[in-house]
Image (cartoon, grey):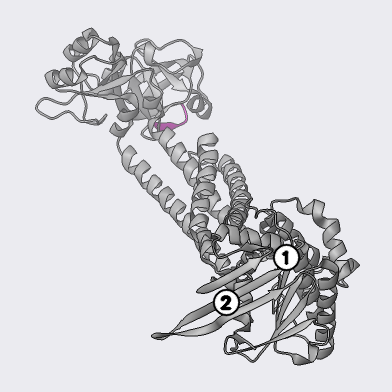
Amino acid sequence: MTTTPQLTRTGLALRGVTLSYPDGESRLTALDAVSLAVAPGEFTAVVGPSGSGKSSLLAVAATLQRPDRGEVVIDGQEVGALGERARTALRRERLGIVFQQSNLLASLTAVEQLLVLESVRGGRPAAARPRAQELLASVGLDGAKQRRRPHQLSGGERQRVNIARALFGRPSVLLVDEPTSALDHERGALIVDLLAEVTRTHGTATVMVTHDRDLLGRVDRVVEMHDGRLA
Amino acid sequence: MFVALRDIRFAKGRFALMGAVVTLITTLVVFLYGLTGGLAAAASSTVAGLPADRIVFGAPAGAAPTVSFGNSTVSAEQQAVFAAAPGVRAAHPLGVSLTRLTTADAATPVSVLGSPAELLPPLRRGSAPQDGQLAVGADTARTYHLEVGARVGLGPSALTVAAITEERSFSHAPTVWTTVATWERISGQSRPTALALSGAPADAAGLDRAESTTTVPTADALAGINGYAAEQGSLQLIQGFLFAVSALVVGAFFTVWTVQRRPDIAVLKAVGASSGYLVRDALAQAAAVLLGGALLGGAAGGAGGLLASAAVPFEVGPATVAVPVAAMILLGLAGAALAVRRITSVDPLAALGASR
């Protein structure tokens, strides 16, 4: 298994990150010299209208997309020079991603959604079961619900599994993509409360991309994006 | 196999269908293998079982020698030359013909092999036939209620059963064995058909040129049995097509399955699964389906073959069951490998956003 070097938890830093896409014969700039630092235990929300570059920022921070220029630093490790394997290992060991849709695997129960990560890491899923059950309980999923498959859970419960899965690898950076887009306001507020709580208890540098300004009361910092730039 | 086994459990209908297809194709292939083996034995076990290293074919005067028991004839001079050739320990004459065996209440076509006692198959009872006597195979003896000492008609002659041998057959007719002199009388031939050599001539090509003969290893002499090559070739062609169909079906299933799984694969990659992990998992899934289906098909084919062997020539053994089962698994895995390599091209970026 490829592992990243032993790093201290220093959070996430984007420095002068620029990203552009081909757009016909020209290029469309999605991120324009974006710089952002998020410390461990800090919950930062990135808001902005559709097309402002929020998702691109998340994709670059998640090492899923290479920027044209600039640096992405995770726990002191600059990821630009890393190859695909090392980036995959970094995602496995340092990053937690909470997807917009819950993106759970239909064939796995709630607890298995977490255990699959232990299998991916080369560990023994059976040995990790107590921790997976504990994590699910900590996000409000107890008992029989842990043995249910995604279609047997409500939208809010699926999102809780999504969060528990993101936390399973003890990440130092938690990236959250529009977590409330499929939920009503009340359930959305509960999920954001939960994210604030796990940021504090797990000490993650949390970046949440959202367009819902009504849910920002629990975050530590709000940054605005417009046309690929941070306001 | 963490995801692989859970996917099978979750989508059991689809995987059961695929497993059933593998089972049915494997059953068919095992049947075909057993039938091919059985027909091969029925056509050639007499020649294949000869205790000889080389078979020498001659030809009627003026004709070119070919590997053919139907055309071949050899002279006493040729036999003497081969017997004296360096590297040859013995050169036995071999007469081959087809005629009719008649008992008190039945008649059946048989192949008659005229040969010295050295070429006889192992004897179960009795002793090697002398002139005016014959040896019959155990199955033939059982079918026609023959025992040592019984009188039978062989073509125009009446002979006494001197021995019961292991069963052999030639050109799908059970073989009876007699002396070369008796064979010549029954077949109306004045010369034996071929020579069976112990050892191999040091200069086989030179001898063949000089004697106008063709010398081949015993295994290659099977092609000289009428219809043998065409029969075996046809059956092997069908086997080949079945293997190709099997690999294509398995490949097509896993191609569709992999395409359906692309969103899951993108998520797993996004959370840190390597392409290697995902490909290994997918191949393990294919192996599980193939192993289950092929073993079940092998068992069904073998059991069905055992039942069918009472009515048709069918051979059940490691070569006719284990080989096709192993081939089905390996070819299916090859088809699956071509399909699941698509996993490597799935972009984990697809897991972000609302595209799912």
Q: Which residue is mark 2?
A: A16
- How far apart are the two marked residues, 2 and 1, measured between alpha carbons? 18 Å
- Quadrant that contains the C terminus of chain A: bottom right
Kind of residue sitting beneath label 1: Thr
**Label 2 element class:** strand
Q: Which residue is mark 1?
A: A10
Residue B246 vs A152, above or below: the answer is above
Residue B107 vs A195, above or below: the answer is above
Residue farthest right in this picture: A143
Instruction: Looking at the picture, tell me which residue is in the foreground, A186 or B240.
Output: A186
User: Do marks 2 and 1 share a chain?
Assistant: yes
Label 1 crowd (10 A; few <14 / some 14-19 / many >=20): some
**Label 1 element class:** loop
Residue B278, can we see it?
A: yes
Kind of residue sitting beneath label 2: Gly
Q: Mark 1 falls within which chain?
A: A
Q: Is residue B97 left or right of residue B147?
A: left
Residue A228 vs B235, above or below: the answer is below
- Residue range (magenta): B103-109
